Image (cartoon, helix red, strand yellow):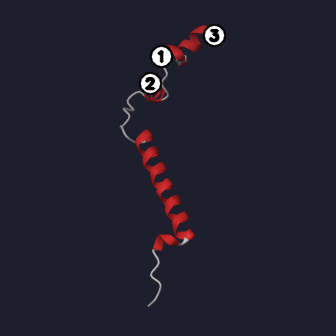
Amino acid sequence: MPDKRSLFSFPLVRELSVVLVIKLALIFVIKSAFFSDPVDMTDPQDAVSQQFGLTNSDYNHPSQSEDLK
């Protein structure tokens, strides 16, 4: 009778399975962090500042910097 060993008894299969599970988990984390909500791009500067967590006072608008010159 042949020796019936489990597929996961081979070290290579175990290592590849662990790597695959880690990669899938990272893909889902990245997807949920960066692609979960659509961004309103009617005003791109405000949309980008909102994504980075900045407020309007944290950066200068181009019109404000022109007034300082």
Q: For the view shown, which residue lies furthest in the top direction?
A: 68
Q: Nearer the viewer, mark 3 or mark 1?
A: 1
The residue drawn where x is 58% and y is 13% is 66
On residue 69, the disc is 3
Quadrant housing the N terminus: bottom left
On residue 19, the disc is none
On residue 46, the disc is 2
For label 1, the residue is: 56
- The amino acid sitting under disc 3 is Lys
- The amino acid sitting under disc 2 is Asp
Residue 20 locus on image (x, y percent): 49, 60
Q: What element carries label 1?
A: helix
Q: Residues within 10 Å of mark 3 (few under 14, many from 20)?
A: few
The residue drawn where x is 44% and y is 40% is 34
In the image, residue 33 sits, relative to residue 66, either above or below, namely: below
Q: Is mark 2 on a helix, strand or loop?
A: helix
- The amino acid sitting under disc 1 is Asn
Q: Nearer the viewer, mark 2 or mark 3?
A: 2
57 and 41: which one is in front? 57
Q: Distance between the residues labelled 3 and 1?
A: 20 Å
In the image, residue 56 sits, relative to residue 23, either above or below, namely: above
Quadrant housing the C terminus: top right
Residue 62 locus on image (x, y percent): 54, 19
Q: In this view, does 36 lie to the left or right of 15?
A: left
7 and 62: which one is in front? 7
The residue drawn where x is 47% and y is 78% is 5
Earlier residue among tags 2 and 3: 2
The residue drawn where x is 56% and y is 69% is 11
